[in-house]
Amino acid sequence: MVELEHLSKNFGAEKAVNDVNLAVAQGEFVTLLGPSGCGKTTTLRCIAGLERPDGGEIRIGGDVVAAPQRGIYLNPEDRNIGMVFQSYAVWPHMTVFDNVAYGLRVRHAPASVIKQRTMKALELVGLPHLADRYATKLSGGQRQRVALARAIVYEPRVVLFDEPLSNLDAKLREQMRVELVRLQHEVGITSIYVTHDQSEALVMSDRVVVMNNGVIQQIGDPQTIYARPANAFVANFIGVANLMQGVLLGRSGEFCDVEIPLGEGYAPLRVQAAGGESAVAGQPVMLSLRPEDIAIHFARPTGIGNGNLFEGEVVDTIYLGSLLECRVFEVGIQTDHYEQIAPQQKVFLSFSPDHGLCLTG
């Protein structure tokens, strides 16, 4: 439904979007994820027609809507897309019904069609009872629902979301995530969603596109992005990861043998981890290890051996309600909140080779 080929956009000497290639299937929910300034919003605005790309090609439903080298550029209103903005962009002088119906009216739809489609869209977002209320009398969550209904009422080919939940409080944001996913599945509309919130991307998406410095770092389903990040940036940006510099010693079957220096006074740690298929012995590598994948023991466990097991001293602890976070050396661990762990306590840490990931490059 949406295809980007070698898309680029420059702001002066800065490459905001650099050779981006992406194909979004019909009915798919794809999230562009990354830190501020990574190029995700500029990519979305190029798809919408709010920015003119400097290179590449954009196709929507097979139609070329932007191709600078061929002199093709369709205005936003000619692309048959819907867009939901971060700031709602709901007109305060109009009722809820009139806000949602606006797109149909400017398309000169018959009055009967306007009424039928507008009420259907309001029912989808749970607001038919507020059709006659003015937008100034709505809560933030209700305004965002109005903006969503307005974006889908004329049945666009694609709906674009530009961080639409960032102005909502935490509880309402969680509720709206569920509502958006439900609505997207119910309507089956192709959706491209921009956010810097990792949990939003993991909860809502069929696929996640991680970007940094205008370049796509990895594309994959949420589980793959989280469990098998392509590089250190993705590992560190998606959730929390311990990233430890080391050297590849060799391979034992499907696993890498990695040596990790622990600092002055400590012997290097030798562990096994997945990944690193392209690495060669002696090459610097990065070990990525999620805090929740590390087990903490108060006595040396039996049956683990010396591999992926090491002894250390707790540096500090942080109580987070549902879990307890602590550091041993510079390694962060997340464990059950009822554990009694104190600074300077001697502990043992272990992890499965499947849960460690050897990263190169």
Image: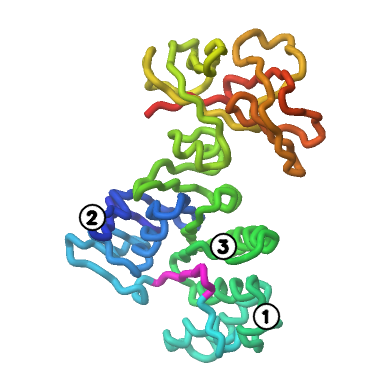
Residue found 73% across the figure and 36% down from its top:
324
Viewport quadrant of the N terminus: bottom left
Residue 192 in the figure: left or right of residue 291: left
In-front residue for pair 154/127 = 127
* Label drawn at residue 128: 1
Residue 120 sits in quarter: bottom right
Which residue sits at x=49%, y=10%? 252
Q: Is residue 289 left or right of residue 323?
A: left
Mark 2 — residue? 13
Residue 230: image x %, image y %?
44, 34
Q: Residue furthest left?
A: 70
Q: Which numbered mark, 3 or 2, is in the foreground of this view?
A: 2
Image marks 1 and 3: residues in contact by CB distance under 8 Å: no
x and y percentages locating residue 78 in the rendered image: 34, 75
Circle 3 is placed at which residue position? 166
Residue 236 forms part of the magenta stretch: no
Instruction: Determine if the magenta segment contains residue 86.
Output: yes
Q: What kind of residue is marked 2?
A: Ala
- Decide: is 171 above or below 248: below
Task: Select label 1 or label 3 by which is in front.
Answer: 3
Q: Secondary structure under badge 1?
A: helix
Instruction: Specify which label sits upstream in the sequence, 3 or 2.
Output: 2
Q: Amino acid at mark 3?
A: Ser
Range shown magenta? 80-88
Name the colour scheme.
rainbow
Q: CA distance from mark 3 to mark 2?
A: 30 Å
Label 3 environment density (alpha carbons within 10 Å; few <14, some 14–19, many ≥20): some
Q: Disc number at residue 50?
A: none
The answer to which of 244 and 115 lies nearer the viewer is 244
Could you give the CA–CA distance between mark 2 and mark 1, rounded to whole angstroms? 49 Å
Q: Amino acid at mark 1?
A: Pro
Q: Is residue 70 above or below residue 302?
A: below
